[in-house]
Each structure stands twice: as C-alpha cells, then as structure tokens.
Amino acid sequence: MLFVLVGLVGSVLVGPAAFATIDECAVGRTCLWDNAGYDSYIGSRPPGGGISNVSATAADRTSSWANRSDTDAAWYPDVNGGGTCRNMPSHTRDPELTLFVRDTLSSWKTNGSC
Ligand SMILES: [Ca+2]
C-alpha cells in the first residue's frame, strides 16, 4: 500500500512531463520542443526543406529536438540561416540543448547538414 501511495504522489509531481514523448514527432519528420525532454511541442517539418525562419512565437524557445527522418537537418540561432550552424543528423535527437545554445533557435533547414 505504501508503494502505491508513493507511486501516485510521484505521478502527480511529474505532471505533464509524464506525457512528454518522442512519439509526438511523427516518423519521417524533424521536430522541435520548447522544453527539455521533448516536452511542449513546437512544430515539425518534413525532409527536403531549405532554410526557413520559425514563427515569431516559436523563435528562441527550442530546448530539445528530434530528427526522425532519413535526411540530415540543421538549425541556426539567427534568422535566415545566420549565426553558428548546428547539425541535427538523421535519426538522432537531443533531449536537452546545452545552456549556451538553448532557447536560441530562429531558423532551420531539413535538406542537409551544416
Ligand atoms: Ca525552451
């Protein structure tokens, strides 16, 4: 019984994170999330897209990403592919961007690496 109670409390404390899942990103797409651990889905793109700016509300928010496509992708801290390019290789993911690049993504592409 004690174990059950602890389990319930743990579930409550975890909250929305318990529902954060890579499956929110459809196979074949590259996806962005606002929070670490694939939480708070921002959006996705299919492979083959050139450099594109994310919307104003999505800019400077990405904290985790996943590339579930067969094509390499990349992102930039500035609009129109500006700033240091960072790779999102095919079939890889990053559950928590490092402090210095977190919340800086402003544009990205899904048609190749940097
Ligand atoms: Ca964020």
Image: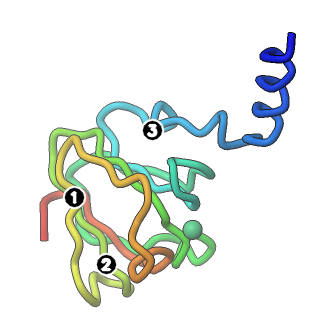
The mark found on residue 31 in the picture is: none
Classed neighbour count for the residue bearing mark 1: other residues with Cα under 10 Å, few (<14), some (14–19), many (≥20):
many
Q: Residue pushed farthest top?
A: 1
Color theme of the render: rainbow
Residue indicated by mark 3: 25
**C-alpha gap between disc 3 and disc 1:** 15 Å
Callout count: 3
Instruction: Give the position of the C terminus as an image quadrant.
Output: bottom left
Amino acid on which disc 1 is placed: Ala
Q: Is residue 101 left or right of residue 60?
A: left
Q: Nearer the viewer, residue 1 or 103?
A: 1
| Residue depicted at 45% across the width and 38% down the height | 25
Amino acid on which disc 3 is placed: Cys
Residue indicated by mark 2: 76
> Mark 2 near mark 3, Cβ–Cβ under 8 Å?
no
| Residue depicted at 22% across the width and 41% down the height | 91
Dividing the picture into quadrants, the one containing residue 35 is: bottom right
**C-alpha gap between disc 2 and disc 3:** 20 Å
Is 93 situated above or below 53?
A: above
Residue indicated by mark 1: 73
Name the element at disc 2. strand
Q: Nearer the viewer, residue 17 or 84?
A: 17
**Residue 60: horizontal and vertical position, in percent?**
52, 78
Classed neighbour count for the residue bearing mark 3: other residues with Cα under 10 Å, few (<14), some (14–19), many (≥20):
many
Name the element at disc 3. loop
